[in-house]
Image: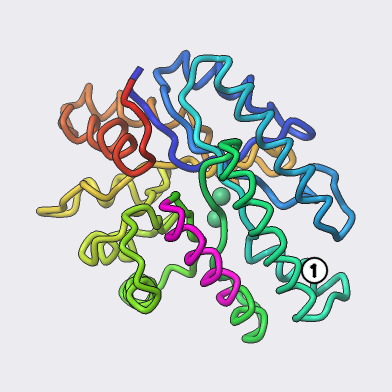
Amino acid sequence: MLYADSHLHTNPLHGYGAGRVAKKFKKEGGWFIALVSLPPHHYGFTETSIDSYRKTLDLLVREAAAAREEGLSVVALAGFHPSEVDEYLRRGLSKKEVYELAVKVLDLITDYIGKGLIHGIGEVGRQHYGTSPERLVLSETIMIDALELACQHDVPVHLHLEQGGWATAFNIAKILGKISCKSGRVLLHHVNYETGLWSSMLGLPATLPVKTSLEKILAAPGIRLDGFLVESDFIDDPKRPGVSAYPWEIPRFFNEKLERKEVSEEAVFKLNVDNVSRIYGVPPP
Ligand SMILES: [Zn+2]
Ligand SMILES: [Zn+2]
């Protein structure tokens, strides 16, 4: 057991669910997953209410337990994705109402973290796709609240962001400075090559998608791998195959690279064990 998936979603309603995913991932060499909740309507909780989030959090707790039963180390994160901002505005909520719902959701998440049921916040951030400026600024406001909470409690937080290279990474570093956050657990998730390079230079941890930027970052001359993690961003939705990778593509990728001697065992260990254990605060396998 050596491999970690530092950001994935499971959906017991439409897909495999965490138990089956964990079993297969473990069989292929997995030891750790960071399990991130999906927006409530993905699980069939379609009512616009805090209650839908309570149900989502309870489902996440059950999913994390199912993965643990298969022998994985699991960290569970819940958030308020920028796509949820778009979704609720489409449903007719005012901007203020969306913000107030998000504040309640973050409160609820903090409560679950306090009880040890979940371990961090994610995803929050900014839309990576075209949206209106006001939706973007609302999402960012929610992100800043989430960052303050995550830093106060020293828990991991996964940021979903536009991939603007220096502009994205520097902006987050700047916000962290403004809120006096010294956490080493603010992760830029799903970074592309350029944003990954700048995250590393600015000392921000980042997760590399196995299908895209991982290979490019590994090939970057003189790159320090200390802040990097690897993710599948699996969404567990059979209706949208190919949108993301499968978690077991992580062990397959590294095993092939190791066989061809294109990556060192030290690098593999760093990305899958050392960094995971340090950034998520979990004991190594
Ligand atoms: Zn994301
Ligand atoms: Zn995701």
Q: Residue at x 25, y 34 (%)?
A: 274
Secondary structure at badge 1 equals helix
Seen in the image, is 231 located left or right of residue 182? right
Seen in the image, is 9 located left or right of residue 5? right
Classify the position of ligand 1 by quadrant: top left, top right, bottom left or bottom right.
Answer: bottom right
Indicate the position of residue 268 as horizontal and vertical percent values.
24, 32
- Highlighted magenta segment, given as a residue range: 140-154
**Up-down relation of residue 47 to residue 31 (above or below):** below
Q: Residue at x 28, y 38 (%)?
A: 271
Q: Residue at x 68, y 67 (%)?
A: 103
Indicate the position of residue 163 as horizontal and vertical percent values.
43, 68
Q: Residue at x 63, y 51 (%)?
A: 109
Count of marks placed on residues: 1
Q: Quadrant of residue 88?
A: bottom right
Q: Name the magenta segment's main secondary structure.
A: helix
Question: If the image is split into quadrants, where does the C terminus sit?
Answer: top left
Seen from the viewer's position, the closer of residues 164 and 100 is 100
Q: Tell me: is circle 1 under 8 Å from ligand 1.
A: no
- Indicate yes or no whether the magenta region holds residue 141: yes
Question: If the image is split into quadrants, where does the N terminus sit?
Answer: top left
Seen from the viewer's position, the closer of residues 76 and 167 is 76
Indicate the position of residue 116 as horizontal and vertical percent values.
56, 37
- Indicate yes or no whether the magenta region holds residue 15: no
**Up-down relation of residue 157 to residue 132 (above or below):** above
What residue did someone put label 1 on? 88
Tell me, what colour scheme is on the image? rainbow
Indicate the position of residue 233 as horizontal and vertical percent values.
52, 44
